Image (cartoon, rainbow, N blue to C red):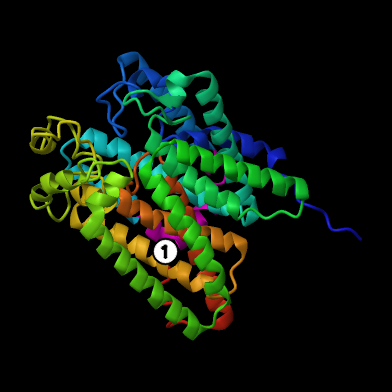
């Protein structure tokens, strides 16, 4: 008797229903082809692309379509999604704190709206964990990544006014995205997803290799130094992962200590010679003003140290406390903190920063534990997503930013790893070792 095979994911109707919201979150809610007139203007910041009144309507329609689709698919499987959400309620701690910050926000209407979107995005991640399991989820995201990659190449080739950044003369590629840094950083997640795709078909293996190579070309041509560094670190992680899985407990401890020493040495070198290294990479000695931005923001942290200025309600231009930063010489275009945890502290205070750090640290510890228990390729993919999320919190990416696939993937990885830890706990009965897992 032959065992029935599951329907290929590309033949499922829901796959194509979810493609638009996935691409929307991939592009952070702003596609380059309908924002080119703004994102290719000098003085426009990557995280605050100015739009006209007519374009604002287009933005609203796109957002309505993306989140409407999310609410539809979540609503159609509400009962099962709620069961998964209850088992992983901790992932809603940060979105709920964002909603609560409406009470003290500098812009209550904006905070309430953005907080609701954060809740919806988190619920969507819960739905994906419930609906797509194992390699099926990787296949779904590979389809989204392939669509983003092909779209980027088409825009670069045929609509260079949108696909290529012409502002500074560098001709950096940005593809589907409104900024070259977005292209580089998001493609890192798709590169990791493609790496863990499992197939025995020789043709698919060839396509996988070609797909990964095309992603590397996009990352390189984006001229995003942050993405370049992350790509090197991710490849190093791939090399670290295999021996870590195979080694015994004591050997893993030694390897972890060696990696910690190497990381410490790297940080020390970066702190001492960071300016020279930045110049070699084609950046200014202070990494394009980041040191000055941090210095300008530190006084603001202590004005509302516990709960911050409200979710998405600090950088409001000349309104509120951000005026102190904007009016500082050389910082007129500053619209984000260039550090995920620092940004969270400004918006949700030490409380929000602590919750974000706890989520990152718990997901990291769960990932390390899972790697020590013969993980599947799917589990290893979730561990890699956690690794990239930790890097993102350090390198200037934002934690729980609206309309972003980074938060979506982090929540997915957190839930999947927590479920894996529960499964291991049930088998090996190690309650003390697993005390950190939710």
Secondary structure under tag 1 reads: helix
The residue at the point 31 percent across, 54 percent down is: 394
Res. 255 image quadrant: bottom left
Q: Is residue 361 above or below residue 183?
A: below
Q: Is residue 381 magenta?
A: no
Of all residues, the one furthest to the right in this rendering is 1
Image coordinates for residue 77, horizontal then vertical, percent: 57, 46
The residue at the point 64 percent across, 51 percent down is: 136
Q: Which residue is mark 1?
A: 363
- Residue 117 appears in the rendering: yes
- Residue 344 appears in the rendering: no
Toward the viewer: 303 or 290? 290
Toward the viewer: 206 or 126? 206
Res. 282 image quadrant: top left
Q: Is residue 111 left or right of residue 175?
A: left
Q: Is residue 89 magenta?
A: yes
Image coordinates for residue 71, horizontal then vertical, percent: 48, 38
Toward the viewer: 45 or 437? 45
Res. 62 image quadrant: top left
Q: Is residue 176 above or below residue 357?
A: above
Q: Is residue 104 left or right of residue 227?
A: left
Quadrant in which the N terminus appears: bottom right
Which residues, given as a range, are shown in magenta?
A: 73-92
**Magenta stretch mostly in which secondary structure?**
helix
The residue at the point 40 percent across, 75 percent down is: 258
């Amino acid at each position: 008797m032959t065992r029935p095979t599951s329907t290929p994911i590309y033949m499922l109707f829901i796959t194509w229903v979810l493609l638009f919201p996935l691409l929307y979150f991939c592009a952070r809610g702003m596609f380059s082809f309908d924002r080119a007139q703004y994102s290719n203007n000098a003085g426009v910041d990557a995280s605050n692309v100015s739009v006209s009144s007519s374009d604002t309507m287009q933005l609203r329609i796109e957002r309505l379509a993306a989140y409407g689709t999310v609410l539809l698919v979540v609503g159609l499987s509400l009962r099962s999604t709620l069961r998964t959400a209850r088992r992983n309620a901790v992932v809603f701690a940060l979105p709920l704190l964002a909603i609560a910050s409406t009470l003290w926000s500098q812009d209550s209407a904006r905070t309430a709206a953005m907080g609701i979107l954060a809740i919806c995005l988190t619920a969507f991640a819960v739905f994906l964990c419930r609906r797509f399991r194992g390699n099926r989820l990787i296949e779904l995201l590979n389809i989204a990544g392939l669509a983003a990659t092909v779209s980027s190449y088409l825009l670069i080739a045929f609509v260079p006014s949108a696909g290529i950044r012409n502002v500074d003369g560098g001709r950096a590629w940005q593809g589907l995205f409104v900024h070259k840094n977005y292209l580089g950083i998001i493609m890192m997640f798709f590169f990791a997803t493609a790496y863990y795709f499992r197939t025995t078909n020789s043709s698919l293996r060839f396509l996988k290799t070609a797909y990964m190579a095309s992603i590397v070309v996009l990352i390189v041509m984006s001229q995003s130094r942050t993405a370049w560094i992350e790509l090197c670190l991710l490849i190093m992680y791939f090399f670290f992962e295999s021996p870590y899985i195979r080694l015994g407990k004591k050997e893993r401890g030694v390897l972890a200590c060696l990696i910690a020493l190497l990381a410490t040495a790297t940080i020390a070198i970066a702190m001492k010679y960071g300016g020279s290294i930045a110049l070699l990479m084609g950046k200014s000695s202070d990494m394009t003003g980041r040191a000055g931005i941090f210095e300008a923001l530190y006084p603001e942290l202590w004005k509302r140290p516990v709960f911050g200025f409200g979710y998405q309600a600090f950088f409001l231009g000349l309104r509120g406390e951000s005026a102190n930063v904007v009016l500082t010489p050389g910082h007129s275009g500053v619209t984000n903190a260039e550090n995920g945890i620092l940004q969270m502290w400004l918006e949700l205070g030490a409380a929000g920063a602590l919750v974000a750090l706890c989520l990152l640290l718990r997901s990291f510890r769960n990932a390390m534990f899972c790697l020590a228990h013969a993980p599947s390729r799917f589990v290893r993919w979730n561990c890699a997503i956690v690794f990239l999320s930790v890097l993102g919190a350090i390198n200037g990416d934002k934690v729980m930013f609206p309309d972003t696939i980074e938060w979506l993937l982090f929540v997915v990885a957190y839930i999947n790893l927590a479920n894996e830890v529960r499964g291991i706990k049930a088998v090996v009965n190690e309650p003390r070792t697993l005390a950190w897992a939710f």
